[in-house]
């Protein structure tokens, strides 16, 4: 599973979860991005195509974005991505958007655990290429 985390809030929340020794599944790759508003939706689709079973996007709470409205842009794109996945015949629960501040390591860890459980229920991605 892939987690795309905002540099200013969620990545720090992930770091706090780690330093607080909160348990999280090890099968998640975290990539720090400057802002969720800078995530091109094709990155998410490409991750699913390349073999990720799910993608978690974690950013600042609305109103707390370092760049003012980046997270709101991601929220709008996320709704479009959910519709696109459903139209393509893929379960839109394979992508998830959450808000977690730098002080919410527990929220970040719970989001990861919930997403991994959801992906286990859904099984491997139908877009996964053979052999990956």
Image (cartoon, rainbow, N blue to C red):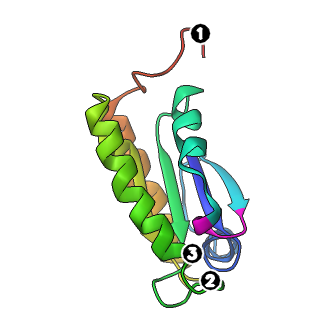
Decide: marks 1, 3 in contact (CB < 8 A)? no
Residue 27 visible in the shown view: no
* Vertical position of residue 59 compared to residue 4: above or below: below
- Return the disc, 3 or 2, that comes first in the chain's sequence: 3
Query: Which of the 4 image quarters holds residue 84?
Result: top left
Query: Which of the 4 image quarters holds residue 76?
Result: bottom left
The image's mark for residue 131 is 1
* Vertical position of residue 11 compared to residue 78: above or below: below
Between 116 and 67, the residue placed more toward the observer is 67
Q: Secondary structure at mark 2?
A: loop
The image's mark for residue 70 is 3
* Vertical position of residue 14 compared to residue 90: above or below: below
Front disc: 1 or 3: 3
Measured Cα–Cα span from mark 3 to mark 2:
16 Å
Identity of the residue drawn at 43% across and 46% down: 116
Identity of the residue drawn at 27% across and 38% down: 86
Image position, residue 19 (x, y; %): 70, 74
Q: Which residue is mark 2?
A: 102
């Amino acid at each position: 599973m892939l987690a795309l985390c905002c540099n200013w809030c969620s990545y720090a929340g992930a770091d706090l979860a780690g330093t607080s020794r909160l348990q999280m599944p090890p099968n998640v790759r975290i990539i720090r991005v400057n802002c969720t508003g800078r995530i091109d939706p094709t990155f998410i689709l490409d991750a699913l195509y390349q073999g990720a079973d799910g993608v978690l996007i974690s950013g600042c709470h609305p109103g707390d974005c370092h760049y003012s409205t980046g997270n709101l842009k991601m929220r709008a794109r996320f709704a479009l991505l959910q519709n696109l996945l459903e139209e393509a015949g893929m379960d839109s629960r394979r992508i998830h958007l959450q808000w977690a501040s730098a002080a919410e390591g527990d929220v970040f860890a719970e989001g990861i655990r919930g997403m991994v459980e959801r992906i286990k229920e859904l099984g491997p991605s139908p877009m996964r290429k053979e052999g990956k």
